Image (cartoon, rainbow, N blue to C red):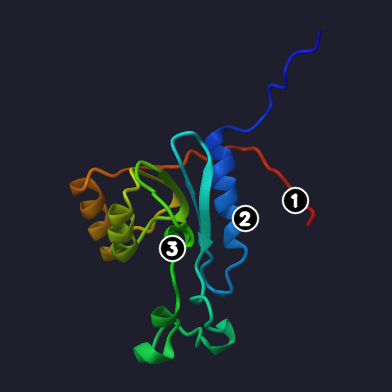
Amino acid sequence: MPEKRKDYITWDQYFMGLALLSKERSKDPKRQVGACIVDKNNKVLSIGYNGAPTGFSDDKIPWAKEGKLVDTKYPYMCHAELNAILNFHGDLRNSKLYVTYFPCNECAKAIVQAGIKEVIYLDKPDHDESVEVSEVILKECGVAYRKYETHDRQIILNI
């Protein structure tokens, strides 16, 4: 009798893979971020990526990183975490968020308010004040966070 396959991916690999695939929808020329929210039963609730709000053309975004605020991308973009939260119309309490880049302080507040209990991130910048504030907010509000443990496995999608 054949045995079940042993080389399948873990739940963490699967959900971070969805976040990595989601980031490919971002039009940002410098940083693409993806997010995936799952419930306690490993059911995907929502995904998101950093991009323009619904109804706002990303052709209208000035993609600059510096200059007057109105002339930069920052006031026009929704972060992946916020998009994933806003894309779900229901209860996110006790869910987990997989994200390719550690949440900023604004997203940390939204994560807390949504009731998300764990953040699994792929990358985190060093010496970023927004990240330092995020860590304080998440810790103070009882949201666990951990770095995703990367694996050598590669999956190629020919889409």
- Element at label 2: helix
Q: Relative to the observer, which residue lies in front, 106 or 31?
A: 106
Sequence-first disc among 2 and 3 = 2
- Element at label 3: helix
Q: Amino acid at mark 3?
A: Leu
Residue 127 visible, this angle: no
Question: Distance from label 2 to label 3 (Cα)?
Answer: 19 Å
Residue bearing the label numbered 2: 21
Residue 123, percent from left and from top: 45, 53
Q: Residue furthest left?
A: 140
Q: Residues within 10 Å of mark 1 (few under 14, many from 20)?
A: few
Residue 53 visible, this angle: yes
Compared with residue 121, is residue 43 higher up or lower down, i.e. above or below?
Answer: above
Q: Relative to the observer, which residue lies in front, 129 or 109?
A: 109
Residue sitting at x 34%, y 62%? 107
Compared with residue 35, is residue 9 higher up or lower down, i.e. above or below?
Answer: above
Q: Where on the picture, by quarter, is residue 132?
A: bottom left
Question: Distance from label 3 to label 1 (Cα)?
Answer: 28 Å
What label does residue 85 carry, if any? none
Quadrant the N terminus occupies: top right
Q: Mark 2 and mark 1 in contact (Cβ < 8 Å)?
A: yes
Which tag is nearer the camera, tag 2 or tag 3? Answer: 3
Residue bearing the label numbered 3: 86
Residue bearing the label numbered 1: 157
